[in-house]
Image (cartoon, rainbow, N blue to C red):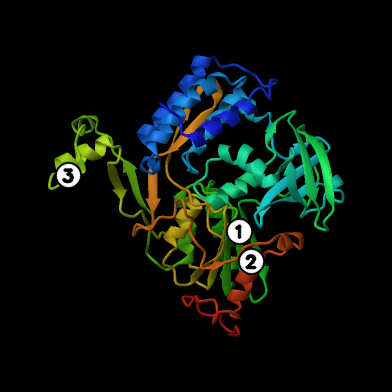
């Protein structure tokens, strides 16, 4: 089977990358490497809910081409890195390859011995947003990495970073490409050119090694599960940073007596990567009078081998007025789906008074999975408005399985949409008011989305933002 030209270039680029990390362990036999590749390919073909969006000819051609490629990898890191590239072809944030822990512990991202660099995608550029404290004057926050190993940063990303990242949305791919720009095993060296906020150009030669210095600038702090702050005009700010720990529900309930004083509320989900849908829904119970919430519509693929066999040779014309032929045809083409539920239903069980006030929900690219489910449940709430950027755009029920050498993988088995069928996976949930942060905002420590929410809740901009479902706070100016 001939490999398409674009994939041939990818495989050729991969071969240039090989043999660069000989110090990494090489525990897998060639046949084990082929088995792991084939295992992932098989599980995708059988279970991946978005298989209909995949070009099957290209997918199978890439699999065939990967067989000699993975056999030639010189160590376990290179092998798993190649599996990640194979996985990235599927463009799904809930379908991933995970390196064995023993390998992953040797892969560094921000540490370079005497230097430590944290990078974010801001304004479409790779911006250094944090360093170790001793380097804050040498490499000011807000500096841009403009060149990596002799290549313009965007070219380096396109060749060496983006092809290995699994993402459902382009903007999350951009974010992860920036944050993973310098990711690599211990001993990997990078030649960098950096442009400071004042325009000075600096060159650095950095090699991955553990950084002993603990202090960073700005300080690196643990956000915690829930944070509560107060702003003028009795505006309460509550950051819900994860739905992965049920403890957040009790933490929120503990804050209720204080929250009853609020005239307006800001719920910050920008750092909430998900967890359990039920945990988020239990908090929403206290933010609405609705008795029932309607969440995502769920669909999965349905396999009936006999129908797949009966479908050989059938055409769409054969399915007209024949339910049996339709099942056979769809099974044969891996496109038969089962509706799990037309809408996830959550019944409000709050046992305390509610906090029903004008509410701004801050969202962003890191608002993911169960946090997106929270937003779907809250979609019809007339006292809530979403401010910020598109969400992560990926959710579902992954099927997890092991791969040779201690690594693992997961494949998304469930498609979620709004109850009315609107899709958000691959697109993200859009804010009612979009706020895109700039490098200037970051350097000046200006939280543009939060400030927009505060201004909105004060009622200053209610007439010109194009959103009418919220009324001004009592006593606020229009």
CA separation in Å, label 3 and label 1: 54 Å
Q: What residue is disc 2 on?
A: 450
Decide: is 260 above or below 105: below
For label 2, the crowd category at 10 Å Cα-Cα, with few meaning under 14, some 14 to 19 and many 20 or more, is: some
Percent position of residue 83, x then y: 53, 30
Residue at coordinates 54% horizontally, 23% vertically from top-left?
A: 69
Residue furthest left as drawn:
321
**Which residue is more in the foreground, 453 or 74?**
74
Residue at coordinates 51% horizontally, 46% vertically from top-left?
A: 275
Label 3 element class: helix
Percent position of residue 103, x then y: 63, 26
Label 1 element class: strand
CA separation in Å, label 1 and label 2: 11 Å
Decide: is 299 above or below 295: above
Residue at coordinates 71% horizontally, 45% vertically from top-left?
A: 152
Proximity of marks 2 and 3: CB atoms separated by less than 8 Å = no
- Asked if residue 431 can be seen in this view, the reply is yes
Labels 1 and 2: the sequence-earlier one: 1
Judge depth for marks 3 and 1 and give the one in front. Answer: 3
Labels 3 and 1: the sequence-earlier one: 1
| Residue 84 in which image quadrant | top right
448 with respect to 169 (left or right): right
| Figure quadrant of the C terminus | bottom right
Q: What residue is disc 3 on?
A: 317
130 with respect to 60 (left or right): right
Judge depth for marks 1 and 2 and give the one in front. Answer: 2
Label 2 element class: helix
Image disc number at residue 239: 1
Residue at coordinates 42% horizontally, 35% vertically from top-left?
A: 58
CA separation in Å, label 2 and label 3: 56 Å
Decide: is 447 above or below 25: below
């Amino acid at each position: 089977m001939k490999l398409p030209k674009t994939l041939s270039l990818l495989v050729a680029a991969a071969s240039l990358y090989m043999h660069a990390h000989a110090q990494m362990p090489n525990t897998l036999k060639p046949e084990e490497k082929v088995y792991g590749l084939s295992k992932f390919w098989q599980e995708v073909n059988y279970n991946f809910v978005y298989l209909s969006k995949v070009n099957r000819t290209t997918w199978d051609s890439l699999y065939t081409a990967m067989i000699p490629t993975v056999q030639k990898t010189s160590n376990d890191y290179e092998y798993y890195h190649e599996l990640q590239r194979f996985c990235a072809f599927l463009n799904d944030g809930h379908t991933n390859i995970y390196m064995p822990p023993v390998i992953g512990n040797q892969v560094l991202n921000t540490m370079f011995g005497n230097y430590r660099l944290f990078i974010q995608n801001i304004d479409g550029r790779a911006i250094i947003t944090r360093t170790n404290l001793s380097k804050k004057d040498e490499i000011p926050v807000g500096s841009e990495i403009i060149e990596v190993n002799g290549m313009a940063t965007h070219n380096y990303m396109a060749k060496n970073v983006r092809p290995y990242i699994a993402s459902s949305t382009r903007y999350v791919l951009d974010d992860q490409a920036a944050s993973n720009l310098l990711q690599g095993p211990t001993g990997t060296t990078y030649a960098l050119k950096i442009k400071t906020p004042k325009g000075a150009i600096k060159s650095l030669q950095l090699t991955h090694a553990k950084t002993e210095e603990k202090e960073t600038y700005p300080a690196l702090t643990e956000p915690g599960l829930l944070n509560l702050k107060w702003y003028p005009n009795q505006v309460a700010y509550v950051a819900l940073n994860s739905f992965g720990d049920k403890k957040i529900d009790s933490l929120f309930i503990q804050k209720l007596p204080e929250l009853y004083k609020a005239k307006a509320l800001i719920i910050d989900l920008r750092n909430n990567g998900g967890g359990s849908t039920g945990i988020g829904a239990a908090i929403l119970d206290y933010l609405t009078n609705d008795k029932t919430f309607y969440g995502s519509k769920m669909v999965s693929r349905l396999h009936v081998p006999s129908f797949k066999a009966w479908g050989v040779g059938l055409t769409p014309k054969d399915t007209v007025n024949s339910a049996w032929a339709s099942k056979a045809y769809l099974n044969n083409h891996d496109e038969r789906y089962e509706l799990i539920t037309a809408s996830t239903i959550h019944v409000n069980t709050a046992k305390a008074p509610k906090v029903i006030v004008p509410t701004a929900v801050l969202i962003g690219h890191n608002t993911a999975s169960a946090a997106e489910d929270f937003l779907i449940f809250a979609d019809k709430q007339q006292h809530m408005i979403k401010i910020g950027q598109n969400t992560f755009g990926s959710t579902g029920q992954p099927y997890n399985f092991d791969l040779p050498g201690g690594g693992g993988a997961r494949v998304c088995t469930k498609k979620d949409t709004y109850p009315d069928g609107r899709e958000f996976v691959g697109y993200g949930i859009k804010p009612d008011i979009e706020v895109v942060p700039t490098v200037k905002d970051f350097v000046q420590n200006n939280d543009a989305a939060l400030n927009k929410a505060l201004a909105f809740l004060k009622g200053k901009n209610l007439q010109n933002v194009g959103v009418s479902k919220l009324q001004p706070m009592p006593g606020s100016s229009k």
